[in-house]
Amino acid sequence: MSEQQIPAKTPLYQEHVQCGGKIVDFAGWLMPVNYGSQIEEHTAVRSDAGMFDVSHMTIIDVWGDQAETFLQRLVANDVARLNLNQALYGALLNDQAGVLDDLIVYRLAQGYRCVVNASTRDKVLAWMQQHSGPEAHFEHKPQVMIAVQGPNAIQRLLQVEAVSGLAELAPFYAMHHGAWLIGRTGYTGEDGVEVMLPEAEGIELWRKLRDAGVAPAGLGARDTLRLEAGLNLYGQDLDEATSPLASNIGWTIAWEPAERDFIGRDALEQQRQTNEQKLTGLIMRDKGILRHGQVVHTNVGEGVITSGTYSPTLEYSIALARVPKKAAGECEVDIRGKRKTATLCKPPFVRNGKVMHS
């Protein structure tokens, strides 16, 4: 087996093993899918706090005199509008306006920090290299990254680390704490933070949080939480063949100023006139579980489920589906050769513990 085929381990790998984590290969990384009960982990995040190892994500620092110009060209959102320590969610597009990746960009005193997906690391780094100039520099910066999520996440973190000003940190802003960067961001639909920090300090923080009773949570709970929150998973809900306008992230496109020539803009301008699809929510009304790839029959044509699961919070099945733009109301889903009734709805399904649909 070549070196490229050997799954990687995050610095917290042994912590997962010691916590009884069930390890799986995820995007080339050995990661815990759960620590015994996915539903208990999910519920802990919705009701109290849980923590995720997201060190497999790709951290890229960008700096130099042309750093802003470089990112304004690459990112379809407007990084020029960011205040110091503010973050935004956006997309990297190819020339056809397909989504190369979705990412978070932080504006920091020394430049910018981009956090992109684990599965797209090589592709994104090559794309950045292709479009970089002499006055814009970037570097992949591996660090431990721990997401502490849930209504009590801030309180739980403060129990183990005195972080001055953390309680007042606004959503989608970041702050420094020694060598740490703490962003009030997440992927669960709950309050919380994502902490980027050096390896030794990351292992220590994980252990302190665990000893304080913060539940470790795996990939399984991360997926059900993000789907309840109506958040996309790259590679399922959006990819290089899909437009952001058909992926429920059209709101991240900064059309103004009109003269900003970001990659994919020309194709995207055409898609504004021609796109006939949308990514929307589905609620199961019959018995059965909605899954990726199932065909959806709507009042105006067929679509397909991109992500589907059983919702532990709602106690029925939910999904995201790409369907005709004018689809609405009830629909039917092909499940094992039978058509089952579902209802189209606008995501999210759950936000900050509140049920958005019934």
Image (cartoon, rainbow, N blue to C red):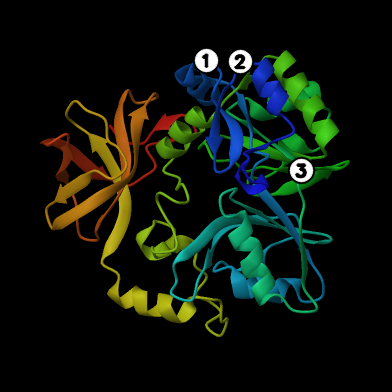
Q: Residue at x 36, y 36 (%)?
A: 356
- Name, please, the residue furthest toward the bottom: 259
Q: Residue at x 36, y 28 (%)?
A: 311
The answer for how far apart the CA atoms under marks 2 and 1 are is: 7 Å
Tag 3: amino acid = Gln
* Quadrant the C terminus occupies: top left
Q: Image height check: is 318 above or below 75?
A: above
Q: Earlier in the sequence, mark 2 or mark 1?
A: 2
Tag 1: amino acid = Gly
Classify 10 Å Cα crowding around label 2: few (below 14), some (14-19), many (20 and above): few
Q: Which dot marks residue 143?
A: 3
Q: Is residue 4 visible?
A: yes
Q: Is residue 235 left or right of residue 300?
A: right
Answer yes or no: do the residues labelled 1 and 3 have beta carbons within 8 Å?
no
Tag 2: amino acid = Gly
- Name, please, the residue furthest toward the right: 178
Q: Earlier in the sequence, mark 1 or mark 3?
A: 1
Q: Is residue 338 left or right of residue 199?
A: left
Q: Which dot marks residue 20?
A: 2
Q: Residue at x 49, y 24 (%)?
A: 42
Classify 10 Å Cα crowding around label 3: few (below 14), some (14-19), many (20 and above): many
The answer for how far apart the CA atoms under marks 2 and 3 are is: 23 Å
Q: Residue at x 54, y 69 (%)?
A: 76
Q: Name the residue carrying label 1.
A: 36
- Name, please, the residue furthest toward the front: 1
Classify 10 Å Cα crowding around label 1: few (below 14), some (14-19), many (20 and above): some
Q: Position of residue 47 (x, y in %)?
A: 52, 21
Instruction: Identify the element where label 3 is drawn.
Output: loop
Q: Earlier in the sequence, mark 2 or mark 3?
A: 2
Closer to viewer: mark 2 or mark 3: 2
